[in-house]
Amino acid sequence: MKSGSRANALLVELLIVIFFFMLASMILVQLFADAKIKTVTARATNSAMLETQNLAEDLYAAEDPESFLTGMGFTGGEGEWTLTRNDYVLHVIPSAEKTAAGTLRTWQISATRNENVLITLPSTRYLPEEEVSP
Amino acid sequence: MSKKSAVRAPGMIQNVFVLLLLAVFACLSTFLVTMGAQLYRNTVDSAEVNNNTRIMTAVVRSAVWAEDGGEVLVERFDDLGLSTLSIVNDFDGDIYYKRLYCKDGYLWESFTSAERPFTGESGEDLCPLGKFEPSIDGKMLTVQLESVDGTADTIRMYLRAGGAKE
C-alpha cells in the first residue's frame, strides 16, 4: 500500500512537471517562431534596401525610365509600377513637377512585405529645359 | 496466475507508464533544445550575412559619394593581381589616389599621393570581403561584390558630380 501511494505521488509530480514544461515549451516555440519571422524580415529588408538603392541610381541615370522599368519586369503604368520578388514587392511611384526652367522628376521607390513597408527611397533628378552652361 | 503476480501487475503498468512519460519528457526537451539551437544558429548566420552585406556596400557607396567630385576609374595591377576602384582628386595641384580593392579576404582602402607607387600594402583593411570587381560603363559604376560566405551582391552607382574616365 505504501509503495503504491509513493508511485502515485511520483506520477502526479511527473504530470505537474510535464504540464509546466509544456507551458514553457509553448512560450518558447512562439518565441522561436517570432525570431524566425524577424530573421526572414531582416533578410528581406536587406535585399530590398540593396535593390532599391540600385534602382534609384538606375532611374536617375535612365534616359527613358518607363522603358527601363518595363525591361526590368515592372508592370503598371502612369500611377504606380510594381515588381514582385520572392520576399518582397517593389513599388515605384513617379511624379514630376514642371517649372519654367525645367522638370523635377521624382521616383518614390518602396519595398513592401505582407502590406508592411520595409524601405522607402526617393530618386530625384532635375531635368533643365535647355542645357545649362557651366 | 498466482495471487501474488496478479497484485503486482497494476504496479508494473504504472511503472511502465511513468517510464513512458519520462521518455516523452526527455524526447520533447531534446527536440526543443535542438530546435532552439538550430534557430539561434540560423539567426546569427543570417544577421552576420546581413551585416557583412550592409558594411561592404556602405563602405563602397560612401567612399565614392565622398569623393565623387574626383575622377573615377578602374585600375588593374597585374603584377599585384589587384583590380582597384580609384578616385583621383586634385588638392592644390597635388594629385591623390583613393583606391578600394580586395586583398587577402578583406576590402582595403588606401589614400596615397600620385608620386608614390601603389603596392597594395599602403592601405588599411576595412571589412571581410571575398571578391571585388569594379567596372564602369559611361557614368554608371558597377561593383560586383562577394562576401566571405559566398553571398554575391551588386552595387550600381551613377557618378554625378565627377565622372568616369572615358
Image (spheres, rainbow, N blue to C red):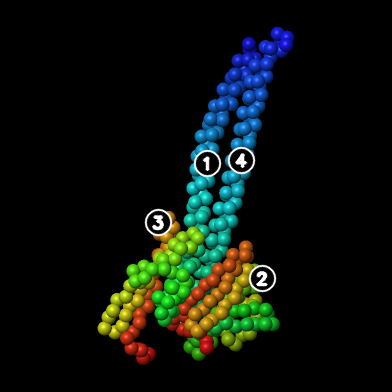
Q: Residue at x 59, y 41 (%)?
A: B32
Q: Which residue in the structure is indicated by mark 2?
A: B104
Alpha-carbon span between mark 1 and mark 4:
12 Å
Mark 4, chain letter? B
Residue B152: percent from the left, percent from the top? 58, 67
Q: Which residue in the structure is indicated by mark 4?
A: B31
Q: Is residue A54 left or right of residue B16?
A: left
Q: Residue at x 53, y 31 (%)?
A: A20
Q: Amino acid at mark 2?
A: Asp
Alpha-carbon span between mark 3 and mark 1:
27 Å
Mark 2, chain letter? B
Q: Nearer the viewer, mark 1 or mark 4?
A: 4
Q: Residue at x 56, y 53 (%)?
A: B43
Q: Which residue in the structure is indicated by mark 1?
A: A28
Alpha-carbon span between mark 3 and mark 2:
43 Å
- Marks 3 & 2 on one chain: no
Residue A68 or A46: which is nearer the viewer? A68
Q: Residues within 10 Å of mark 1 (few under 14, many from 20)?
A: some
Mark 1, chain letter? A
Residue A133 or A124: which is nearer the viewer? A124
